[in-house]
Image (tube, helix red, strand yellow):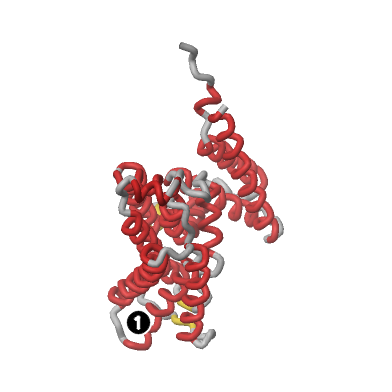
Amino acid sequence: MAEPSGRAFLTHEHVLAVLVIGETALFAALGSHFLSAGNAAEVARASVEIGLLALALTPVIVTGGIDLSVGSLLGLSAVVMGAAFRDHGVPIGAAALLAVAVGAAGGGLNAALIARLRLPPLIVTLGTFSLFRGLAEGLTGGIQNYSDFPERFLFLGQGRFGPLPAQVLVLAGAAVLVGLLLHRMAIGRSLRAIGYSPEGARYAGIPVGRRLLLVYLLSGVAAGLSAVIYVARLGQAKADAGTGFELTAITAVVLGGTSIFGGSGTVHGTLLGLLALALLQNGLRLSDQPAELAGILTGVLLLGAIGARSLLSERKRG
């Protein structure tokens, strides 16, 4: 039997890892203090909210779905938390739990419309994208900014455990949980089956509705948790919190190799995609490049990743 060629073992994640190494080498040469421990901690700190959303969106996109509402839901959860704490005297811990509950409720609404009524995820979450942001703006009048949170709460977003930013432990825990869900449990195989063919999965006895309920509910919980960390990091909650986060999170997922058509995707690929985006934005800033260049290069990276995935798929079929 012939030995498989080295190219047979080339995966999208390998290509992305090479890209991350190349980015690191380039920006280490161009930017000052890029390789410092302090900068590494700041890159990690600034990536947690997007990372939580990207991790939760990975199983959503694996099923062939999408959730465009997570950024708006983050904003709504943040202002509800701020209003509960400052205007209604709710203890900060209970207010943080309320933010997560709001996220779960928003995810539950998406889940019910998509899983129970079988409405298209793109249309549903595009609608709730506007709904959640509109509610956040209505609660604040578009100008209210909640601040003056207690120091013990701000530690979650600004403190450290040794060299590690405190919130990185939350991201690590979420990565482990989603990794177990997607790669070590039978439910992960069922999510891939749904992504390949929802009707085929139903005929195979997979409870498609319940699986979709789970992934969209998880997405909402991630938005609520991200809101808590966002408020703790910046020390403020306002209606525009999380603006654009949904697109950045989806970009990280697709850049990491998850098929936008469903059926395949990995947590480690999503984390690599997140790292590639974070290094790009941070490196451009430290090397004094125009801010607009980040958007251009992110688009180039995304198109390149899709092209590389298509090429690798063709080689596998060949």
Report the amino acid beneath label 1.
Phe
Q: Residue 182 vs residue 137: left or right?
A: left
Q: Nearer the viewer, residue 94 or 115?
A: 115
Tag 1 secondary structure: helix
In the picture, residue 291 is in which quadrant? bottom right
In the picture, residue 282 is in which quadrant? bottom right
| Residue, disc 1 | 85
Rendered residue at 54%/30% (across/down)? 317
**Quarter of the image with the C terminus in it:** top right
Q: Nearer the viewer, residue 249 or 192?
A: 192
Farthest-out residue, top: 1
Give residue 311's position: percent from left, percent from top. Answer: 61, 35
Give residue 133's position: percent from left, percent from top. Answer: 50, 76
Rendered residue at 39%/55% (across/down)? 171
Please, is residue 78 above or below residue 160 in the view? Answer: below
Q: Which of 214 and 166 is in front in this view?
A: 214
Please, is residue 43 above or below residue 236 in the view? Answer: above
Label 1 crowd bin: few (<14), some (14–19), many (20+), radius 10 Å: many
Farthest-out residue, front: 203
